[in-house]
Image (cartoon, rainbow, N blue to C red):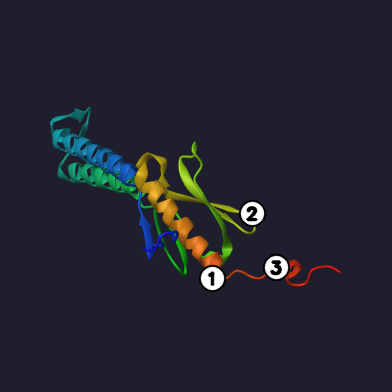
Amino acid sequence: MQAGKAFLPRQVTAVPRVLRIALTVVAAGIVGAMTVIAVLLPSSSVGVVAFGLVDQLAMFGLGLAMGGAVLFLGRSRVDADVHGVRVRNIASTQHLSWSRVKAVRFEEKSSWATLLLHNGDEISVLALQASDGQRAVAAVRGLRSLLAAYEAANAKPREDLLYPPG
């Protein structure tokens, strides 16, 4: 690397590690609790209702479904390269070329990073969370480097500098 030249990553990939760990613990707790309920279910009865194997399996299946739903909340991810950025949040995925991105923002008090678009819209990048500390900061720097490289490679000369008045 030459002095004075910024490092340009070939690719930036990030996931919310702390969030995923927390969600995994919560999901395991839900599955564990529902398993205990399923095992203890036949020993209890409510009046004329008697619980059987089907009820136990349903409770266990419900626990798996709820655990899976909790894990789904941590599916966010960001992947970027010289061509553009792909942002996968909880329920949506967006592919953006760098030409649409104006800035990569990650304010000191923000919970996660955002992409400011040239049309004024903002896209949350839930994969880059403040709770991930330096990992998130490094990924934001990588995204900013890729954006700066795109802008430098596609800079248009200013008309006012080419043809001065007068």
| Foreground of the two, 105 or 57 | 105
Residue nearest the viewer, comparing 146 with 127:
146
Q: Of label 3 and label 1, which has the lower sequence position?
A: 1
| Badge 1 density bin: few <14, some 14–19, many ≥20, Cα 10 Å | few
The secondary element bearing badge 2 is classed as: loop
**Amino acid type of disc 3?**
Arg
Residue at the limit of the structure toward the front, as seen here: 3
Give the side of residue 150 with respect to residue 76, left or right: right
- Classify the position of the N terminus by image quarter: bottom left
Mark in the foreground, 3 or 2 = 3
Quarter of the rendering containing residue 28? top left
Q: Name the residue under label 3.
A: 158
Residue 31 percent coordinates (x, y):
22, 41
Q: Residue 153 carries which label?
A: 1
Can the viewer see residue 93 in this picture? Answer: no
Q: Which residue is drawn at 66% across and 70% down?
A: 157
Q: How crowded is mark 3: few (under 14 residues within 10 Å), some or many (20 or more)?
A: few
Q: In this rendering, does residue 20 appear at all?
A: yes
Q: Name the residue under label 2.
A: 120
Left or right side of 106 for 137: left
Residue, x 42% and y 56% (percent of image)? Answer: 142
Of badges 2 and 1, the one in the foreground is: 1
Q: Which amino acid does label 2 sit on?
A: Gly
In terms of sequence position, does the residue under pointer 2 or pointer 1 come before the other? 2
**Mark 1 residue type:** Ala
Distance of mark 3 from mark 1, alpha carbons? 15 Å
Q: Is mark 3 on a helix, strand or loop?
A: loop
- Is the residue marked by circle 2 packed among few (<14), some (14-19), or many (20+) residues within 10 Å? few
